[in-house]
Image (cartoon, rainbow, N blue to C red):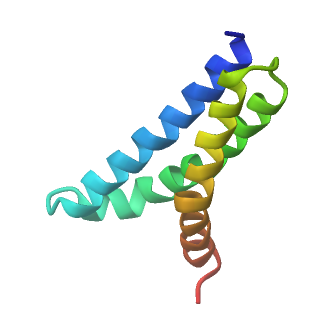
């Protein structure tokens, strides 16, 4: 397995981990205000950029099953979660 595939998987798992952290902090009562004021935009940015970087790294990797799996995982994550994060980041940045 090439380094690009490994980094593609790493960016996928970074995005998944960020989504899990987002769900935990947004549902807890203790740190909700701090999270929304300081960390939400960074988390949304990671959710948007990580799958895109993973797809690009997967496209430039060597042929094989791992390449297809890496591209598919990152593409599915981008379509299912990152587009909603992009809309949320747009609303936070530019308002209603």
Q: Nearer the viewer, residue 94 or 79?
A: 79
How many numbered discs? 0
Q: Quadrant of residue 18?
A: top left
Specify the quadrant that holds the N terminus. top right
Please tell me which residue is depicted at 76% across the width and 29% down the height of the picture. Answer: 57
Please tell me which residue is depicted at 56% across the width and 46% down the height of the picture. Answer: 46
Q: Quadrant of residue 54?
A: top right
Please tell me which residue is depicted at 51% across the width and 42% down the height of the picture. Answer: 15
Above or below for 92 versus 24:
below
* Residue 61 picture location, percent across and down: 80, 21
Above or below for 54 versus 52:
above
* Residue 5 picture location, percent across and down: 68, 20
Q: Nearer the viewer, residue 57 or 43?
A: 57
Q: Nearer the viewer, residue 94 or 22?
A: 22
Specify the quadrant that holds the C terminus. bottom right
Does residue 33 appear to the left or right of 96 in the view shown? Answer: left
* Residue 9 picture location, percent across and down: 58, 27
Does residue 9 appear to the left or right of 30 in the view shown? Answer: right
* Residue 59 picture location, percent across and down: 81, 32
- Going by the picture, which residue comes out furthest to the front? 65
- Going by the picture, which residue comes out furthest to the bottom? 96
Q: Nearer the viewer, residue 16 or 44?
A: 16
Above or below for 23 versus 11:
below
């Amino acid at each position: 397995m090439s380094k690009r595939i490994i980094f593609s998987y790493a960016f996928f798992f970074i995005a998944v981990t960020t989504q899990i952290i987002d769900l935990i902090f947004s549902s807890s009562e203790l740190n909700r205000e701090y999270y929304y004021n300081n960390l939400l935009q960074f988390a949304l940015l990671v959710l948007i950029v990580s799958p895109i970087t993973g797809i690009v790294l997967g496209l430039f990797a060597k042929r094989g099953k791992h390449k297809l799996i890496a591209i598919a995982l990152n593409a599915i994550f981008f379509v299912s979660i990152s587009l909603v994060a992009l809309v949320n980041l747009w609303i936070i940045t530019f308002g209603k």
